[in-house]
């Protein structure tokens, strides 16, 4: 399953000169060295990543797993972060928000069920009230069902579609309305979830909003406990061995990835470095699918 990220990046053409800060740390270098480094740094500064300092992002399902890793990584990149999950995970959300504040960023919790449009609206209102105008939406919340296809009930099927598809649409559409209302879309914004993402990419391009998907492969999070329990029932794989066995047999790298591996890709998608990328699906799978 894919996950979605919406981004809104200011394209005002002014790039921070990271080199100045970097070079000031080299107090033991000679003046000539510093001068040369500054000159080289100035020449290449447009190649370095624009800072995300002060921008704001909402990440759904970020009390744990990949969402939490994205929240911490984007905070390290400079983002202020709105942490979301279901109300039963409020305490875990608050812990993540606390950790982000300890990194010197602003953070808030906005519990909401992404399948409910009115809750998604309120989540965005909370984020804007606490953190200021929205720049990026990462529709990361999702679930997995592991059972034989003939055993999937109508109720199971609806639940999966509600969270993994309707939930993404709710987040992306409400965030897009917010971005357009903010009226400062000379920037670019960006998202993700295959299929939906292409529609969003095409229809939002006129607002300078871009949309992309990140598609994790086998990533070691709590989700794999559910997959492990399910697969060990319907296959001959032993309980506790499923993730490693599947990763070994399916991926070129032969091992599962970490939530941080995905967060690094999302950091790129949430930055100005991906300004000219839209409607794409970015795989983070250790070599399972080749595009
Ligand atoms: N872990 C993997 O190997 C893997 C592989 C492919 C895709 N993914 C996708 O990446 C995303 C994150 O996965 P993860 O491994 O961190 O899973 P996870 O189960 O650890 O975390 C998912 C989070 O989403 C939250 N959530 C579920 N339904 C929600 C709802 N209706 N509203 C708000 N929050 C809700 C859960 O409470 C949970 O905290 C998911 O969309 C998942 O499908 C994961």
Image: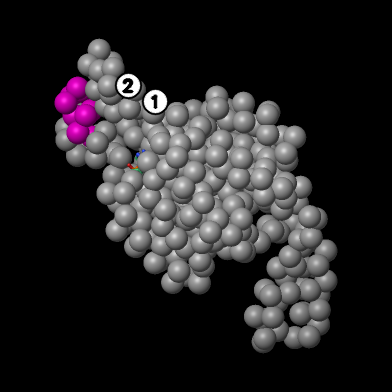
Write down which quadrant ligand 1 falls in.
Answer: top left
Q: Residue furthest top?
A: 150
In the displayed structure, 178 sits above or below 25; it is above
Q: Which residues are magenta?
A: 228-236
x then y, percent, for residue 176: 61, 40
Q: Main secondary structure of the magenta part?
A: helix
Residue drawn at the location 70% of the way across and 84% of the way down: 29
- Asked if residue 139 shows in the view, the reply is no
The quadrant the C terminus occupies is: top right
The quadrant the N terminus occupies is: top left
| Mark 1 residue element | helix
x then y, percent, for residue 10: 71, 53
- Residues under numbered marks 1 and 2 in contact, where contact means CB atoms less than 8 Å apart: yes
Q: Is residue 32 left or right of residue 138?
A: right
Q: Magenta segment: does it hold 89? A: no
**Which residue in the protein does label 1 denote?**
161
Dot 2, crowdedness within 10 Å: few (<14), some or many (≥20)? few
**Which residue in the protein does label 2 denote?**
157
Q: Is residue 257 left or right of residue 192?
A: left
Residue drawn at the location 21% of the way across and 29% of the way down: 230
Q: Is mark 1 within 8 Å of ligand 1?
A: no
Q: Magenta segment: does it hold 231? A: yes
| Gap between marks 1 and 2 measured at Cα | 6 Å
- Asked if residue 171 shows in the view, the reply is yes
Q: Quadrant of residue 42?
A: bottom right
Q: How many marks?
A: 2
| Mark 2 residue element | helix
In the displayed structure, 135 sits above or below 291; it is below
In the displayed structure, 221 sits above or below 2; it is below
């Amino acid at each position: 399953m894919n996950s979605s990220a919406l981004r809104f990046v200011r394209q005002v053409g002014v790039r921070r000169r990271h080199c100045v800060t970097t070079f000031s740390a080299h107090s033991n270098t000679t003046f000539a060295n510093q001068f040369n480094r500054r000159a080289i740094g100035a020449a290449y500064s447009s190649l370095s990543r624009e800072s995300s300092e002060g921008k704001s992002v909402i990440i759904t399902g970020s009390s744990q797993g990949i969402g939490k890793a994205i929240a911490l990584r984007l905070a390290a990149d400079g983002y202020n972060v709105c942490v979301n999950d279901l109300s039963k995970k409020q305490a875990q959300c608050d812990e993540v928000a606390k950790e982000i504040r300890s990194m010197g960023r602003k953070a808030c919790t906005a519990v909401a069920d992404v399948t409910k449009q009115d809750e998604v609206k309120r989540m965005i209102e909370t984020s804007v009230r606490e953190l200021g105008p929205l720049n990026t939406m990462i529709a990361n919340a999702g679930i997995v069902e592991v059972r034989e296809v003939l055993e999937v009930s109508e109720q199971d099927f609806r639940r999966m579609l509600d969270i993994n598809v309707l939930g993404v649409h709710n987040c992306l559409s409400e965030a897009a309305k917010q971005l357009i209302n903010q009226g400062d879309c000379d920037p670019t914004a960006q998202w993700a979830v295959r299929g939906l993402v292409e529609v969003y990419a095409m229809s939002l391009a006129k607002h300078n909003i871009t949309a992309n998907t990140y598609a994790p492969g086998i990533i070691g999070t709590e989700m794999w406990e559910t997959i492990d329990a399910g697969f060990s029932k319907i296959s001959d794989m032993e309980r506790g061995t499923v993730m490693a066995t599947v990763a070994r047999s399916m991926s070129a790298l032969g091992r599962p990835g970490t939530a941080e591996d995905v967060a690094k890709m999302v950091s790129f998608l949430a930055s100005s470095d991906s300004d000219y990328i839209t409607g794409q699906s970015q795989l983070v799978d250790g070599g399972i699918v080749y595009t």
